[in-house]
Amino acid sequence: MQRILPLVAAQAPPRLIGESISAFAEETSKALAHHPSAKLVVFPELHLFGDGNPDLQRTEALQESAEPLDGPRISELRQIAGDLGIWLVPGSVCERGPQGQLFNTQLVLSPEGQLAGYYRKIFPWRPHEPYDPGDRFAVVDVGGTTRVGLNICYDAWFPETTRQLAWMGAEVILNVVKTTSPDRKQEVVLARANAIVNQVFVVSVNCAGPTGQGRSLIVDPEGNAIVEAADAEPVLLAADLDLAAVDRVRTHGTEGVNRMWSQFNSGEPAIDFPVYQGRIDPATWTPQSPDLRNNP
């Protein structure tokens, strides 16, 4: 069975807090018109939470904008996904947690208008961000096509996060980003490196200028950029991901050589990692397989 994931990654400037959701609906429609066969549209981190120009990202404004996952904002976003019949990642949102926490939460909305999955950023960019850290990783099965792993900005600087998502069966990592600082050039390297060492696709979509540094890119499982933004100007990046590439690279090796997920032999001793109080156990090293039996 051929598995193709057509998608659009929208490098766009953030929208102001409180702006009418109809403007975002129109923006999403335009992104879809750019690549009409797209099944998935992805926006940058905190795309709906701009705080002026320049973007001040004030803690008070972010706190005041937070809503629970069953709040009106997410209901409106669900409606957009359902009306357009697409998988939609509207970036991340300011979520009010069950105990009053402020989470930076990435959403995945289904073509049926449901909240298919969410992920609370585990590694807020400290000391600059006010968010409470999440405590669990998240993957979402996109219909019968693939499994995606959810990842927000600074998470990419911790290679354990992408490794965990790959082990959980993710074939595509959706890294939504709001990088306003000069280190975007290092993040571009990290997007390629995380793809290479886990043999997965990486979609790293940053916000556009004047707020963000741009340079969004979509990377294949061998670290090659399928498409990338040269600068911070707003742009729509379209790609049709051939998901068979993940199996092919893992079977034959990166550049026909390296097969990290086949490193261990049965019965070999575990390797302790004291920094994690954990270990790599050869018996559980192999990634989980996504359940693709239910086609959309």
Image: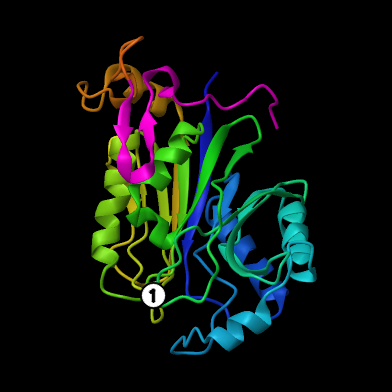
Taking the spot 35% from the left edge, 9% from the top edge, the residue there is 267
Residue 149 placement (x, y as % from top left): 51, 43
Residue depicted at x 73% and y 62%: 69
The residue at the far top in this view is 266
Q: Quadrant of residue 210?
A: bottom left
Query: Where is 131 relative to 57, above or below?
Result: above
* Number of residues whose C-alpha sits closer than 10 Å to that of mark 1, classed few (under 14), some (14–19) or many (20 or more): many
Quarter of the picture containing the N terminus is top right
Q: Is residue 176 left or right of residue 38?
A: left
Which stretch is magenta?
A: 270-296
- Looking at the picture, how far across and down is residue 101, in whole percent? 64, 70
Which amino acid lies under the numbered mark 1 shown in the image of this protein?
A: Gly
Residue 36 seen in this snapshot: no
Q: Is residue 278 magenta?
A: yes
Q: Which image quadrant is residue 63 in?
A: bottom right
The residue wearing badge 1 is 212
Q: Is residue 122 left or right of residue 296?
A: left
